[in-house]
Image (cartoon, grey):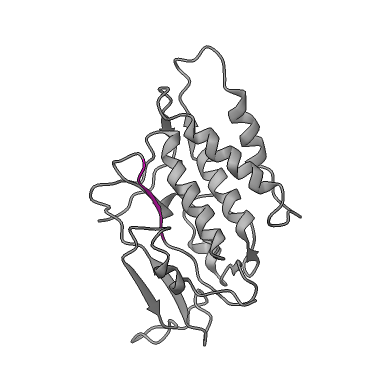
Amino acid sequence: MTARSPSVYLTCQDIVGKCRTVVELPVRGSEPGGEDDDFWHKGKAQTLLIIAVPFRTGGHQAKQPAAFVPIIQQLQELHKKGFVHGDIRACNIVFGEDPKEGWLIDFDFDFGGEAGVVKYPNGYKQTLDDGRRIGEEGNEIKKVDDWYGLGQLIFDLHRFDRSNMTAPDLTLWELEGFWTTTPDGWEEGLPFEDQVVKLLKYVGSYRHNGYKLHPIFKAFLEN
């Protein structure tokens, strides 16, 4: 089965209601004075999904753990449609003023081949400015890698404020231990999906109990 282009994702309004436009970009190197860029494989046009979200009324930083609920749900639906995001990191997640508003942005490219797989373009790792990523240039990125990246973002780039708690929350550390385990050898559709459900319930449970996220990293998005 051939992987579908992200352009098909434009029709999935039930997944990302804020989707505004899909931009099909030609191979780089055709600009005046430009040189062939390894970021774009010569001779292979890529399709990039761009979601225009209300940056002026929203912001990057999550205010509470429950803000990640819509992000987790969107990633679940994205995977159900056969896509892989491929670039889960802080600057590709935006939160709105409403705690129920959060969006995944900047989906990676579809290089064809196996369904639900994207690949690191040559030279891509040099462009990363935040987040911990598994894989090397040219390696496949699968659904489980998306979950690994999201888990790292939640637990590595933020810490929970327990100043008013009398004891640490052991569940957090149990989940952190799971997400910091490299998923080598995992097969899609096996145990990690149960862990995703557990993560969804976990972050959702901290909606009204006074827990807040203290950022130890912050990315800025231009309007």
Q: Position of residue 159 (x, y in %)?
A: 49, 31
Judge from the rendering whether residue 195 lies leftward or rightward of residue 98; answer left or right: right
Q: Position of residue 133 (x, y in %)?
A: 58, 54
Q: Position of residue 114 (x, y in %)?
A: 65, 73
Q: Position of residue 192 (x, y in %)?
A: 67, 47
Tell me what residue is drawn at x 58 percent, y 50 percent: 147
Tell me what residue is drawn at x 57 percent, y 19 percent: 168
Q: Is residue 88 visible?
A: no
Q: Which residues are magenta?
A: 100-105
Image quadrant in which the C terminus is located: bottom left
Tell me what residue is drawn at x 40 percent, y 25 percent: 208
152 relative to 164, above or below: below
Judge from the rendering whether residue 162 lies leftward or rightward of residue 117; answer left or right: left
Image quadrant in which the N terminus is located: bottom right
Q: Is residue 31 visible?
A: yes
198 relative to 220, above or below: above
Assess whether residue 194 is covered by the magenta stretch: no
